[in-house]
Structure formats: structure tokens, C-alpha cells
Amino acid sequence: MRTDELIQVLAKDLQPVQPLRKPWLRASIWAVCSLAYAVALLLAISPAPALADIQHLTSLSQLAAFFTFMVAAFGAFASTVPGNGSNLLRWSVVGSLSWLVLLATHQDPGIPYQMPSSEWECVIKIIGGGIPLFVLFIVMARRAAPVNGPLTMALAALAIGALMNVMGCYSSPHTDSMATLLWHGSSIVALVFLGLLVGRTALRWLPSR
């Protein structure tokens, strides 16, 4: 086959392709959907959240968790475009460390930790409640070029865990920050580890070497 014939064959019956939206726009859409889902879930499991019981510094920690949610979400979608996402990855780490520091420093060392009866419920809320957001993210991210699936899914898991942490704390306010640090933090670590495990399979774009 001659070159001109090959070109005609390849160009035959081509359909116009709609460009993929920019990462920040796709991240914004996913973040808005995630927030709407989290609010609906919060109202479903706790019609009257005890917001008045949340202490000031605990609120600061939730702001840090929300910041982590936002930058990790943008970092996850930016990482589906080769060469992007490194700065947002750093900010995701900064947000996570800020959240951990606020929780750890707020704990009174003179008060021994006692396991609340509701902690396993919080674990279920964070991990189980985050599954639908995982599915939505995979559907949206697979259309891009996730060359590093584990990293992309780990960032998405961090964003989901941070958001579900905020939802869990507002549905069941904690008087003991160490409980939040241990149980919520462990749940988020489990989500990130899950993202690393399934990332290569769920977001396969290039053949594995």
C-alpha cells in the first residue's frame, strides 16, 4: 500500500472529537458533586448535626482537612495530564500535615485517651461513604491520560478521605482530638493505600512495563 493510500484509509470516516475539559474544570465539577453528596449523606445520617459542640480549634482542623480535599482533588485531575500536578501534590502534603498537627497539638496530654463507642461508625462513614466518590472519579479520570494511575488514585483517595472526615466530624462531633487523629487518620491512610493498590488497574492508560 502506498503512503497516500494509507493516509486516505486512516482519514476515512473520521468523526470530530470534543476536547477534554481542563483539569481544574473537571476537578471543580467533581468537587461540587462530592460536596453535594457529602451534604446529602450528612443530612441523611444526622438530620440535626451538633455544630455547637465543635470547638474552635477543631473547626480549624476541619478547615485544614477541607483545604486538603480541594488541593488533592485538583492534584488528582492535574496528574492525568503528563507534566502537571507536582505543585498541587506538595500542597496536598502541606494540608495533610497541617490537619495532623492541629489535631495532635490540641490533645491535652493530661487526659488519657478513651475509645468512643462511635468510632467504628466513623470508619464506616469515611471508607464506605467514599466508595461512590471513587467510582465517579474513575469514570471522569479514565477519559484523560493517567500515566501514573497509583499516584492519581492516591491523591483522589486523600481528597475523598479528607472530605469524609469533615462529614464524619460534623455528624458526630468529637471531644477527643486524639480519637479523630487515630481513627479518622487511619481510615484516610487505608483509603490512600487502597488507591495505590487499584490505581494501576482502575486507571490503566499505557501498557504496564
Image (cartoon, helix red, strand yellow):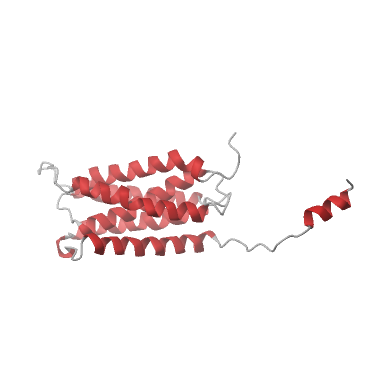
Task: Give the residue displayed 58% in from the left and 45% down from the top.
Answer: 205
Residue 95 seen anywhere in this rendered image of the structure: no
Q: Quadrant of the N terminus?
A: top right
The percent position of residue 41, horizontal first and vertical second, equals: 29, 60
Residue placed most toward the observer, 47 or 160: 47
Residue placed most toward the observer, 123 or 111: 123
**Quick one: which residue is furthest to the top in this view?**
209
The percent position of residue 209, horizontal first and vertical second, equals: 60, 33
Image position of 167 (left or right of 204): left
The percent position of residue 179, horizontal first and vertical second, equals: 19, 46
Figure disc tally: 0
**Quick one: which residue is furthest to the right in this view?**
2
**Quick one: which residue is furthest to the front in this view?**
13
Image position of 31 (left or right of 56): right
Task: Give the residue displayed 39% in from the left and 48% down from the top.
Answer: 157
Image position of 195 (left or right of 123): right
Residue placed most toward the observer, 125 or 67: 125
Residue 11 seen anywhere in this rendered image of the structure: yes
Task: Give the residue displayed 58% in from the left and 36% down from the top.
Answer: 208
Residue placed most toward the observer, 185 or 124: 124
What is the quadrant of residue 114 in the picture? top left
Task: Give the residue displayed 28% in from the left and 42% down from the top.
Answer: 186
Compared with 77, 190 (above or below) is above
